[in-house]
Image (cartoon, helix red, strand yellow):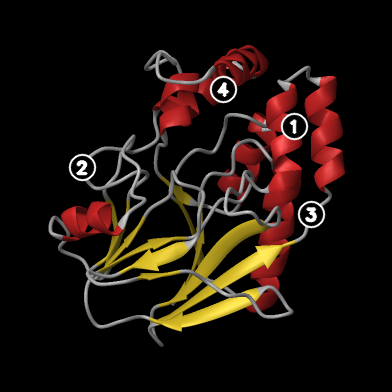
Amino acid sequence: MRYLVLSDIHSNIEALQASVRKAKDAGYDQALCCGDLVGYGPSPAEVIDVLDELKTTSIRGNHDRVVSGLDDPVHFNAAARKAVEWTRESLAPAYLQRLADLKVGPVQVNEAARLVHGSARDEDEYVVTQNDAVVNLALTSPSITFFGHTHEPGVFTRNVRWQPSYDADGSARLHVPGDRILVNPGSVGQPRDGDSRSSFLIWDSDHSLLEFYRAEYPLQTTQARMRDAQLPHFLITRLALGR
């Protein structure tokens, strides 16, 4: 079974479409998403529709929770709060309800893997350091926990952090270590590892293989749509920086 694992799309339809095209070329059977379908970007409804068309198993992210009205953006910076307000105003009630109805992680994929947004303890928790990972790995039972929230692709084991080094075709591969691991596919729509390309992965469960991918997308088109929506300049410029 080949699972397409997405996260942190953040209303970037151009990045999502480019990722799906590349994933289809690589081949996959089922799509998964670790949350944050919306926020920051200009195309929230389009992103939700595409994920529905793909029959994606999606869980809730912190932006999804806040945009849906289940929470207030009290811990968001000013730019993120303005994006939340714009997204709430842009989405029809049916879309807001779809966000509110998203399951909260952890959600089991199969006996070997599960989905969370931030961590198994809290969808708002950032797993950034090796110590963060060790604490969370102690709470895991499946072999693999897919997580997002940090927008940085990579794998944590109990002892090391592995970050993908991409080949010319924008791919990197890692055979799944035997121990329990945390795996972040990176962000589709708002990468923050210094690479502006969309980030996602495919997990080949039959061959115990993680395939990380980067996909070029028409970033300037997304930026133009953000300007048209009068979204914060900071959110527009950071797309090109991958930060």
Provide the secondary structure element on which disc 1 rests: helix
Instruction: Categorize mark 2 by other alpha carbons within 10 Å: few (<14), some (14-19), many (20+).
Output: some
Which image quadrant: the C terminus? top right
Q: Distance of mark 3 from mark 4, alpha carbons?
A: 23 Å
Q: Against 34, is 185 above or below? A: below
The kind of secondary structure element at disc 3 is loop
Question: Which residue appears at 61% of the width and 51% of the height?
Answer: 188
Foreground mark, 3 or 1? Answer: 1
**Residue at coordinates 55% horizontally, 71% vertically from top-left?**
212
Q: Position of residue 219 (x, y in %)?
A: 81, 46
Give the vertical position of 118 relative to 200 (above or below): above
Kindly tell me whether residue 42 is visible in this rendering: no
Give the mark nearest the N terminus, 1 or 4.
4
Q: Which residue is drawn at 22% across and 69% down?
A: 158
Looking at the rendering, which quadrant does residue 177 occupy? Answer: bottom left
Alpha carbon distance from label 2 to label 4: 23 Å
> Which of the two discs, 2 and 4, labels the residue nearer the N terminus?
4
- Badge 2 amino acid: Arg
Q: Nearer the viewer, mark 1 or mark 2?
A: 1
The residue that mark 2 highlights is 121
Residue 211 seen in this snapshot: yes
Q: Nearer the viewer, residue 44 or 85?
A: 85
Circle 1 sits on which residue? 236
Q: Name the residue under label 4.
A: 80
Mark 3 — residue? 217
Among numbered discs 1 and 2, the one appearing first in the sequence: 2
Q: Is residue 30 left or right of residue 199?
A: left
Q: What type is the residue that disc 4 sits on?
A: Ala
**Disc number lying in front (3 or 4):** 4
